[in-house]
Amino acid sequence: MRWTLKRLVRWVNDTFKIECCRETVRKCLKKLGFS
């Protein structure tokens, strides 16, 4: 399974009960050096 931004947003929401948008996840990944 590929981890797309859409799936990551859903996973963050389900796991941590935090709502965020794809742009937020993208920025965090970029800061961490993953994309």
Image (tube, rainbow, N blue to C red):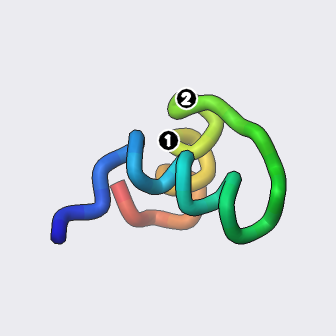
* Residue projecting furthest to the front: 14
- Residue 8, position as x, y percentages in the image: 47, 55
- Say which amino acid is labelled 2: Glu
Task: Classify residue 14 as left or right of residue 23.
Answer: right
In the rendered structure, are the residues bearing label 2 and label 1 in contact, judged by CB atoms less than 8 Å apart? Answer: yes
Secondary element type, mark 1? helix
Q: Which mark is residue 23?
A: 2
- Residue 25, position as x, y percentages in the image: 57, 45
| Depicted 13 relative to depicted 6: above or below | below
- Residue 7, position as x, y percentages in the image: 40, 52
Residue situated in front as seen by the camera: 34 or 2: 2
Q: Which residue is mark 1?
A: 26
Q: Residues within 10 Å of mark 1 (few under 14, many from 20)?
A: some
Task: Classify residue 3 as left or right of residue 5.
Answer: left
| Depicted 15 relative to depicted 30: above or below | below
> On the image, which quarter does residue 14 sit in?
bottom right
Residue situated in front as seen by the camera: 7 or 31: 7
How far apart are the two marked residues, 2 and 1, measured between alpha carbons? 5 Å
Query: Which residue corresponds to the image point at 82% horizontal and 57% vertical from the top-left?
Result: 17
